[in-house]
Image (cartoon, rainbow, N blue to C red):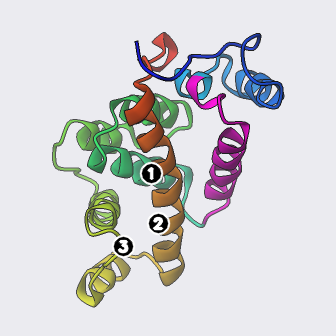
Amino acid sequence: MGLFIKHTLDTAPAASRPLLTGIKAAFGFVPTMFEYMAEAPTTIEAYLQLNELVSKTSFNVSEQQIALMAVSVENKCEFCIKAHKAIGKMKGANVESLAALAEGQVISNSKDRVLAEFVRLVVHERGRITLADQEKFLSAGFTRQNILEVMLIVSIKTLSNYINHLTQPEVNTELK
């Protein structure tokens, strides 16, 4: 048994309960990650707010899911890899690109491949991206705005990936 508690609506701190209720309403269930994250209401709130901001980026839904998964692949977060594969499918993302990324295969869609490679490079190099790598990303049709939005995506996924490394949440059956 680990240090962290898998909370329910009944055991979660009072400030986390409405957040968990909202998550359940949005997903139809509460992903296990949030049951552990409930220990820190401000952490769930921050994650939800960052997630809302990611949805407002100039990336389309498919690109958002590919970038989110790419961080999780680089950080080796199995929960988030499976979650983004399932959520990506629900949201109409490019399932072939997500599957290839999750399985460590070459992504056939060139723009998706460049995005995933760039995001993984940002994580691996801790944001120290060379001008040549930035220009390669831009030459694939992305923008300077996208580069900064990648930093947002890396931030949110690093938050959840690291929490998942600590708490080791089981993957919900709805995400398998």
**Residue extent of the magenta highlight:** 36-57
Mark 2 neighbour density, 10 Å: few (under 14) some (14–19) many (20 or more): many
Give residue 158's mark: 1
Q: Helix or strand or loop: what does disc 2 sit on?
A: helix
Query: Is the residue 48 above or below the residue 89 in the image?
Result: below
In the image, what residue occupies the spot 72% across and 36% down? 41
Residue 174 against residue 114 in the figure, above or below: above
Mark-to-mark CA distance, 2 and 3: 10 Å
Which circle, 2 or 3, is nearer the viewer? 3
Query: Which residue, given by chain and number where applicable, does mark 2 sit on?
Result: 150
Residue type at the position of mark 3: Gly
Label 3: how many residues lie within 10 Å, few (<14), some (14-19) or many (20+)? Answer: few
Above or below: residue 174 compared with residue 152: above
Residue in front for this viewpoint, 81 or 10: 10
> Which residue bears the numbered disc 3?
127
Helix, strand or loop status at disc 1: helix
Residue 107 to residue 88: above or below: below
Image spot of residue 17 (x, y percent): 80, 24
Query: Could you tell which of marks 1 and 3 lies nearer the N-terminus?
Result: 3
